[in-house]
């Protein structure tokens, strides 16, 4: 069997349907840790949310395909808080068929590279508090949990932050980055 070919391309608002489908497939796996009665948002809402996020001036997203089939994505925007200037990783999902293949790692690396290229010294994300798989994934990649926990649609979410600066630059510029923790207002 020939090896699978992975390709990447920038995502646009017209890709909202594909992104919403990937997010929906990922959210279906959340039943394992979601509070009783939780349900994923409707696909149509997901399409609208993705289209709006991809239309933001600061939006940057990348789709991953395996042998031409949509397999995952990341999406980021400028953070909507003041300090520090940060990228927000709005979404990083891989379709369940490609869990454990390294595709999420490649998408994460692409996110970090894209955020650095845009001059962001810091990044934030949030993920469901009960999603141990995602939390371990981010923690292995230098993300540190913040004390902020919010509830969205009945599910607790935890915020994570990480420096995007080289270690020497972080030491000179921001003690909070050195400590690898942040405090998001």
Image (spheres, rainbow, N blue to C red):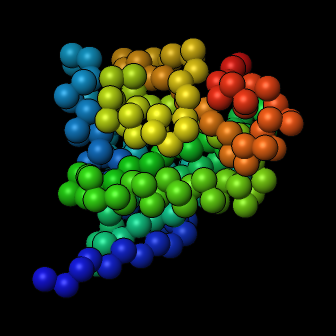
Percent across and percent down for residue 65 are: 36, 71
* Apparent side of residue 38 relative to residue 113 in the rendered image (left or right): left
Q: Nearer the viewer, residue 50 or 64?
A: 64
Q: Most extreme residue toward the left, as rendered?
A: 1
Residue at 33% in and 67% down: 70
Q: Is residue 6 above or below residue 134?
A: below
Q: Is residue 172 above or below residue 4?
A: above
Residue at 28% in and 59% down: 101
Residue at 32% in and 35% down: 133
Percent across and percent down for residue 100 are: 26, 53
Q: Is residue 59 visible?
A: no
Q: Is residue 100 visible?
A: yes
Percent across and percent down for residue 166 are: 73, 48
Q: Most extreme residue toward the right, as rendered?
A: 172
Q: Nearer the viewer, residue 40 or 27?
A: 27
Q: Most extreme residue toward the front, as rendered?
A: 168
* Apparent side of residue 147 relative to residue 93 in the rendered image (left or right): right
Percent across and percent down for residue 118 are: 75, 57
* Apparent side of residue 47 relative to residue 149 in the rendered image (left or right): left
Q: Nearer the viewer, residue 93 or 41?
A: 93
Instruction: Name the quadrant of the C terminus.
Output: top right
| Snapshot quadrant of residue 130 | top left
């Amino acid at each position: 069997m020939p090896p699978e070919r992975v390709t990447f391309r920038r995502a646009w608002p017209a890709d909202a349907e594909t992104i919403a489908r990937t997010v929906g497939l990922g959210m279906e796996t959340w039943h394992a840790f979601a509070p009783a009665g939780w349900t994923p948002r409707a696909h149509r809402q997901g399409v609208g949310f993705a289209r709006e996020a991809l239309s933001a001036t600061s939006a940057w997203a990348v789709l991953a395909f395996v042998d031409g089939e949509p397999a995952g994505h990341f999406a980021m925007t400028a953070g909507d808080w003041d300090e520090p200037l940060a990228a927000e990783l709005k979404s990083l999902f891989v379709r369940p068929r490609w869990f454990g293949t390294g595709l999420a790692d490649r998408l994460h690396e692409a996110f970090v590279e894209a955020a650095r290229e845009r001059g962001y010294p810091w990044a934030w994300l949030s993920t469901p508090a009960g999603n141990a798989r995602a939390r371990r994934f981010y923690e292995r990649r230098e993300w540190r949990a913040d004390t902020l926990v919010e509830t969205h649609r009945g599910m607790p979410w935890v915020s994570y932050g990480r420096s995007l600066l080289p270690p020497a630059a972080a030491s000179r510029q921001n003690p909070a980055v050195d400590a690898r923790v942040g405090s998001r207002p």
